[in-house]
Image: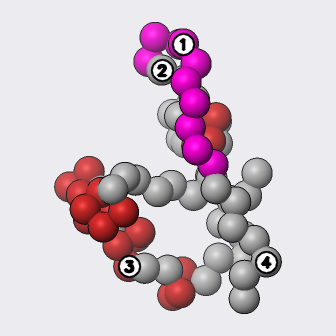
Amino acid sequence: MLGTDGVDADALDPVLLDLSNGRAAQKARFGGELFPNVVEAGSGLVFAEFFQVERDATRKGVIVIEIGGLS
C-alpha cells in the first residue's frame, strides 16, 4: 500500500490539506473525502484497512486508488 513517501505537498490541490469542518471543502470539490494511506492513530491500521471495518466490526468495501508513475 502507498503512504505519503515521495508526495510533493506543494503540488497537491490545497483543498486536500484543508481538514476543517469535517473536510467540508473536500466533500464540496470532490464529492467525498480523500485520505492518504497512513496509519490511523486510534486503531493502528492504515486507512485502507481502517475504513473497511464498521463500528460494529462488520466488514465493508472501500475504494483504494493507487497513483504511481506520474511525473
Q: Which residue is mark 4?
A: 69
Neighbourhood count class around disc 1 (C-alpha, 10 Å): few under 14, some 14–19, many 20 upward: few
State the CA–CA distance, disc 2 to disc 4.
33 Å
Q: Are marks 3 and 1 in contact (CB under 8 Å)?
A: no
State the CA–CA distance, disc 4 to disc 3.
22 Å
**6 is higher (above) or lower (below) than 24:** below
Q: Which residue is mark 3?
A: 14
Q: Are marks 1 and 2 in contact (CB under 8 Å)?
A: yes
State the CA–CA distance, disc 4 to disc 1.
35 Å
**18 is higher (above) or lower (below) than 14:** above
Amino acid type indicated by mark 1: Thr
Residue 60 in percent (x, y) is at 55, 24
Q: What label does residue 58 carry, if any?
A: 1
Neighbourhood count class around disc 3 (C-alpha, 10 Å): few under 14, some 14–19, many 20 upward: few
**7 is higher (above) or lower (below) than 34:** below
Q: Are marks 2 and 4 in contact (CB under 8 Å)?
A: no
Whether the magenta-drawn stretch holds residue 60 is answered as yes
Q: Which badge, 3 or 1, comes first in the chain's sequence?
A: 3
Mark 2 secondary-structure assignment: loop
Q: From which residue to which does the magenta span run?
A: 55-64
Amino acid type indicated by mark 2: Glu
Neighbourhood count class around disc 2 (C-alpha, 10 Å): few under 14, some 14–19, many 20 upward: few
Q: Which residue is mark 2?
A: 54
Amino acid type indicated by mark 4: Gly
Amino acid type indicated by mark 3: Pro
- Does residue 15 appear in this view? yes
Q: Are marks 4 and 3 in contact (CB under 8 Å)?
A: no
Q: Which badge, 4 or 1, comes first in the chain's sequence?
A: 1
**Based on the displayed image, in which of its 4 quarters is residue 65 positioned?**
bottom right
